[in-house]
Structure formats: C-alpha cells, structure tokens
Amino acid sequence: MSAVLSMAWRLARRYLRPKAAQGFVSFISLVGMAGVAVGVAVLIVVLGVMNGFESELKSRILAVTSHATVTGLEGPLHDWQALSVAARRESGVEGVAPYVESRALAAQGRTVRGVLVRGIDPALESEVSDLQRHLKGATLSALVPGSYSVLLGRSLASELGVGIGDRVVLAAPQGVATPAGLVPRVRRFTVVGTIDSGLYEFDHHVALVSLTDGARLFRTGDGVTGLRLRLADPFAAAAVVRRVAVNLGGGFYISDWTREHGNFFRSIATTKSIMFVLLLLVMAVAAFNIVATLMMLVREKRADIAILRTLGAAPRTVLMTFILQGTVIGLVGTLLGLAAGIAIATHLSAIVHALESTLHTTLVDPRVYLLDELPARVTVPDILRVCLTSLLLSVLSTLPPAATAARTQPAEALRHD
C-alpha cells in the first residue's frame, strides 16, 4: 500500500505542476484553490463576528445589569433589609443591593423622552454590577441622597441636549390628585455624569438616581421595588434565584438576565446556524471547481493514464493519484482561507472604522446592532469545524473524476491518440 501511495503522490505532484501548454488546467486549479480559500475565510469571519457579538453583548449586559432580581408581587418590599441579609447567606450569591425602578418621562425644554429611572444605593451598587467603570465625569458617590442628582446614559443625554451641571425634569407616571385634577409628580434633577456602557439600549433609556431620591419620586416610602443579586455563576442565574426566592419564603416575582435578554442570544444562535449552512454553498461551488479541474485533467491525461495502465499500474494507483491531487488543492485553499480569515477577523474593527471614514457612512449602527463596534472572536471549535468541512468537501469532490480515471481502458484511450 505504501508503494501505491508513493507512486500516486509522485504523479499527483507532477500533475499539479503542468507544462506551459497545459496552463489552462493550472489556472482552473488556482481558481479551485481560491474558491475554497474564499469560502473558508468568509465562514471564519462570519462565525467570528457572531461569536464576538454574543460575547461582547453578554459582557456589556452583565457589566451594567444584575444577574437576577427578586421583586414583590403586590407592591414594594418594605422588609427588604431582612430579606437582603437572608439572601446574602444563600450559596452562590455574591452581592445584594436594593433598587427602586419605574418608567418616567425626562424633559429638557421641548424635548421629552421616555426613560427607565432606577434608584440605587451607591455604596452597594458595586456589589451587583460593574457600572462604575462606565461612568464619565462622575462616580456613583455623586448620587448623594437628597441632592436630586442623576446619571444619564450617553445617548439619552445627547438627545436631551444636556451635559454635566444641566438640569432635567423627571415626571413619574403616577399623578397626585388635587382640586384642579390629576397632576403628575415631577422633580428637577441635576446631571452629574453620563453612562457610556457601549450598549445602546442601556445608554439610550436609563437614568440613575439615589435610592432615597427614587423612593421620593415614585412614592414607595421605606420600601423598594426589589433586590438585585450578583451570583457566582451568571449562567446558573435562573436556578439560583428560584432557590433564593423559595428560601426567602416565596411570594416574589423573580427574573434573571437570561430571561430578560434571552431573545438576543437565541436570535444570535439561530443566525449563526443559518449563516453556516448558507455559506457552505460558497464552499460547495469551490468543490464543483475541483471536480471540473480534475475532470479536465483526466481528459487531458487519458493517454498518460492508458500508458501507466499498460505498464502495470493498478486502477487504485490512478484513483489515489487524482484523489491526492484534489485533496492538495482543497488543503492549500483551506490553509490560505484560514490564514486570511483569522487576519481579517483579528483586524475587523480597524477595517470597519477605515471603511466608515473612507465612505463617510456608518456601517455599524448601534440602534440596529445594539453595539457601537463590530467585535470578532475566532474560536478553535469553529476553526476545526470549518476546516474539516472544507477538507471533507474537497475529498468528496475528487471521487467522481478519480473513479472516471481509474475506469479508463488502455486500448480504448490509445485508439484515439
């Protein structure tokens, strides 16, 4: 068997370097390699972008939101201090912080925007999120109770046209009954900083105030909307928060980050699978190029094959010759595509920024993609999956022309030469 492979390999190498008169066959071989390379590179870049988008979205969501929440079923939690102490004792819970949250309107001049106002305890917020490192111009300690200070998302502040030191009016949805009718509860807050998380939905809709000021605005008294939890394992949030709520006595509404943002990640996973299947068609076209190349070579080498068969070469030697030749074309194309795909994915953000500057347009709109950049993360499993699929298609594409060559009858082939 080793002698057959050795002879087949020598013939395959010779056919891969045809003479000048057979340059067209060589050109078709290069086209086949290029097709495989393009398919592999595109697949790696697309899968890398999907992985990077998913990973970056997860990290940014977990940086500004809690892993899980426990809220009251029938209104604010008034015994939240005792519940907070009990929750801290639960295994898997690393931090607990109270919060007050409700929808409101933010107004500056004639500009009005719907916002999510969240009242937090600045001293405890670092236990449940990494929000501090996303603040611009202030720290969480700037939210002094009674000062009516507010931190606005970067995009929200831009739309309202306010900056640090400006004042903005927040109006609660619950009104106050007066002899003149129902009057909304409003309070003027001073902007002390902005939030730049890079997550459009958060930066565009969230306003943070102190827990005390939030309670006054929404009239929750000494109660809070609920407790925010930071867990040792964010991916076990659903199970852990359920256990915590049961151990606290039940009667709570629970939620976690996987439930609130689950649609994002399910859509990413679905899109990733669909894109993989669709882009396989590019590699299938490249495989057809390999079939065409080898078929042309078989017809070109009919006389050579007949002479080899006459001299005693077995059909399996001829079969292995063309299988090896097609495999080499696929292997070289796969390696070139792998190198190109990793290079493009590694520098994708710089490439996108350069294109945006050159074309004077926005290719990655945060209002559409939720992020303000296009991250890419190439993983070893994806590389193996793409490369093995490419090689498998390349090898399978060699079988029809190789079988045709192996069935060549010497007498019939030489009769026409």
Image (spheres, rainbow, N blue to C red):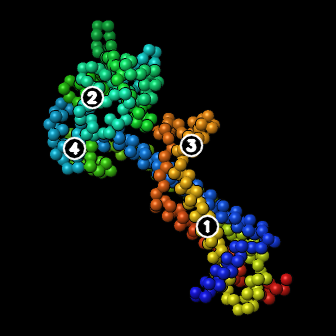
Q: CA distance from mark 1 to mark 2?
A: 59 Å
Residue position for label 2? 141
Q: Position of residue 158 (x, y in %)?
A: 46, 25
Q: Amino acid at mark 4?
A: Ala
Q: Left or right of 29: which side holds 170? A: left
Which of label 1 and label 4 is nearer to you?
A: 1
Secondary structure of the residue carrying tag 3 is helix
Label 4, label 3: how far apart the Cα atoms are: 46 Å
Q: Earlier in the sequence, mark 3 or mark 1?
A: 1
Labelled disc at residue 332? 1
Horizontal side, residue 312 vs residue 54: left or right: right
> In terms of secondary structure, where does tag 2 sit?
helix
For marks 2 and 4, the one nearer the N-term is 2
368 shown above or below 391:
above
Amino acid type of the residue that numbered disc 3 sits on in the rendered structure: Val
Q: Nearer the viewer, mark 4 or mark 3?
A: 3
Q: Is residue 70 visible?
A: no
Tell me the quadrant of the picture where the C terminus can be found.
bottom right
Residue pictured at 57% horizontal, 68% vertical: 391
Q: Which residue is mark 3?
A: 352
- Give the amino acid at mark 2: Ser
Instruction: Tell me which numbered mark, 1 or 4, is placed earlier along the sequence.
Output: 4
Which residue is tagged 4? 245
